[in-house]
Structure formats: structure tokens, C-alpha cells
Image (cartoon, grey):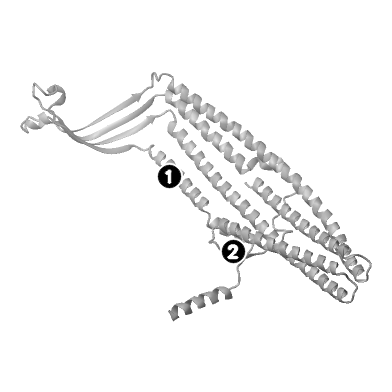
Amino acid sequence: MKRLVFVSLTVLAFVFACPAQTLTLARCLELAKSYSLKARASDAAIRGSELEREELLTTKLPQVKLSSEASYAPNSGTHGYDPAITDGGQLGGRIAVQQSLYDAGVRSLRSEQLSTERNTLVKEKQITERDLVFAVEQLFIEALRSQNEIVLQQQSMRQLKDYLDLIQQLTKGGQASYTDLLKTQVQLQTAERSLQKAHESLASTKYALAEAMGRSIDTSFAIEGSMESLLPVPPPDGNASDLSQNLDITLAQLNVSKSAFDIEIQKSERMPVVSAFADAGLLTSIDNLRLPSSERSGMFGYMVGLSLEVPLFTWGATDLRAQQRQLATDALGLQLEAVRRSVTTDYQRTQMQLKRVEERVRSLRISLKAADENFVLTKSKYASGGVLSLEVLAAQQLLMDLKLDELQTLADRQALLAKMEQITTR
């Protein structure tokens, strides 16, 4: 028992002695990609498509198989089949070879379709990775915003505590009223509640970020980064032509191409199929084996031949299937156009929002400078009896609101940059 307690205390001491891990955005993205279950599933699907194509290519080679058969048919006049046909039954064992000579190009079309399908799966994996990056970036930005908000709320509390100390001194000297003291205490308590909410928001975001990274339920890590330069700013001369290689558009185009192969394959059903076949081995009848060895016919031999299959009449089933494939392809074409429009709209809207955010940042920083000067001036005037306590609290609240507004605007800008990165990823 004592040993167990000692080990437990040692583990706890080690945990508390180890500093919290600090993660950058790059490290979070690296962990998320390493532990992504969807990426592993995509790799398995891609490998399965490659194996399917390899399997199809093997059908170009002659197909060899071993066949054996044994049957017995009584030659009774009452219950038997015609002995000229059954020969009392058959016994055989042969190696057969079959080679397709003409299949109307179905194998080639199917091979190209499987190649397109593999490219589709690759694009789907890239989209999965892109969306994972976007999700992690959004969560990291929100966590960084909450972390910076905590710093701002702590600064606000220090300002209010300093101001409260000043009021307490003035109250003792009879230069400030008890009402001023109460108002300041209430605003300080409000700042404390805001700080608590910021801590709760950070903890909640860390849980979501840990899940996105594929980690256990552990939020002891810290994050670091600059809200100013977390993500790269796209070049100002970008335009909608940059979207030609957008992953969503490319995937939609591949789906249309893959469906178009179905139409061509369906049309080939009307064409004949020619195959060559041959076999060699043993084939004899039971009646032949009943004969003396000197009178038996030969049992070992070979056979070669050609087979031709021509579809004559399918009651319109072939045409109906072709129409179905054509309608499916047309529908995918419409989806492609819808995806292209949606991506273009998102790109243009995000560009416009980025410009507006930049304007807000510049405007806020001008206001922040003025609000900071106003708070310092108002506080000094209050000490000399020039303004009311309420004006000092209003000036402090205005300064705090502008700082939080700037922080949120910077976070919005980073979120828009993440969105732009998602749209233009190739």
C-alpha cells in the first residue's frame, strides 16, 4: 500500500513539474494530419482502386484454368438417356486457355475509368486534408483570440484595481463619495466575470482543438502565435481565374469524366465479343473405359476454337441503360456548374470581406490611440476633481471595448485568410 501511494505521488509530482506543452499552428496542423482517421481511410480507398485496376489489366493475358469432371449415366433402356449422347457418362481433366480477341474496347474504357476513379479518390483525400487544415486553423484562431482576451481582461482588471485604490484613498480624505467606490467595485466585478467567461471559452476551444488533432482529452497544452501574422496574406492581384484548379471544381470535373465512361461502356454492349479458346488433357466416356485396352479410343488430346457473341435483341434494355447513364452524366454536369458558381461567389465575397476588415483595423487603431489618451487624461482630471467618477469608468470601458473589438476584428481577418486559403488550395 505504501509503495502504491509513493508511486502515485511520484507520478503526480512529475506531471505538475513538467511544463505545459506549447503548440504553434504549424505543430497543430502536423499532429492533425498525422492522426487523421479520414486520411487513413482515403489511403485504403486509393489502394483498393489501384488493385482493382491491376486486376483488370491481368485480363489482357490469357486466362488459364484446370477443369475436371466425372459423370455416370446408366444405359438402361427404361431409365437411361440416349447412350449415343451420354456414353455411359464422362471422365475428364483438362487445362483450358481463353483469350479475348475483341471486346469493343470495354477493357480499355474500364481501365481509363478506374484511373479516373483513382484520381477522384486522390482529390477527395486532398479535400479532406484541406478541410481538416481549415478546421484546425479556425479552432486555433479562436483559442488564440480567447487567450489574448484573457490578457486584455487581466489588464482591465489591473486598471480598475489601481483606480479603486485611488478612490479608496480619496474617500478616506473626503474627496470622493461612497457611491464612486461602489460603482468602481461593480465594474471590477463585471471585469472578473468577463475574465472567467474568457477562460471558459479558451478551455472549450482547446477541447475541440485537441479532438481535431487526434489527441486524448488533454487541454494542458498552451498555444502561441501572433494574431497579426498567423496566416499569409494572399497577393493583391488575385482573381477568379485562380480557381481553375480549385479542389472542389476539379473533383466535380472528375466525376463528370468518370460518368462519361459509363456511357461509352454502355454503348459497347451492342458490339460483338470475340474470344479464342483451347484446352488440352484427358476426356473419355465410361463406355470407352469398359472396352478392352486394345479397343479403346484415345483419351488424351486438345481442342482449339473461336467464340462469337453478338447481342441481337434486348427489348430496349440497352438503350434504356444508355439513357440512364446520359441523364446521370448531365446531372453531374449541372452539379459541376453549381460548384463552380459557389466557389467563385465564396472567393469574391471573401475578398470583399478582407478589404472591409482591413479598413476596420485601421479605423480601430486610430480610435484606440484616442481612447487610451482619453482614459489617462480623464483619470488624472478625476484626481484633481475636474471630472466625475462615472466619466473615468466610461473612459476605461470605452478603451476596453475598443481593444476587444480590435482583437475580434484581427481574429475575423485570420479566419477570412483561412477561408481564402481553403478556396485557393490546389
Amino acid type, mark 1 = Leu
| Of pointers 2 and 1, the one earlier in the residue sequence | 1
- Crowd band around label 1 with a 10 angstrom C-alpha radius: few (<14), some (14–19), many (20+): few
Amino acid type, mark 2 = Thr
Residue 153 shown left or right of residue 27 in the figure: right
Question: As displayed, is residue 139 above or below residue 65?
Answer: below
Mark 2–mark 1 distance (CA, rounded to whole Å): 42 Å
| Mark 1, residue position | 51
Q: In which quadrant of the rendered image does the N terminus lie?
A: bottom left
Residue 408 shown left or right of residue 372 in the figure: left
Q: Could you tell me residue 360's position as x and y percent? A: 80, 52
SS for dot 1: helix
Question: As displayed, is residue 313 above or below residue 332?
Answer: above
Residue 411 shown left or right of residue 97 in the figure: right
| Mark 2, residue position | 219
Q: Could you tell me residue 158's position as x and y percent? A: 78, 70
Q: Nearer the viewer, residue 199 or 365?
A: 199
Question: As displayed, is residue 342 above or below residue 194?
Answer: above
Q: Could you tell me residue 255's position as x and y percent? A: 54, 36
What is the residue that sits farthest to the bottom in this orientation?
Answer: 2
- At a point 81% along the width and 67% down the height, the residue shown is 182
Q: Nearer the viewer, residue 172 or 156?
A: 172
From where the camera sits, is residue 246 visible? yes
- Crowd band around label 2 with a 10 angstrom C-alpha radius: few (<14), some (14–19), many (20+): some
Residue 395 shown left or right of residue 100 in the figure: right
Q: Nearer the viewer, residue 153 or 264?
A: 153
SS for dot 2: loop
Residue 364 lies in what quarter of the image?
A: bottom right
- At a point 77% along the width and 50% down the height, the residue shown is 357
From where the camera sits, is residue 237 visible? no
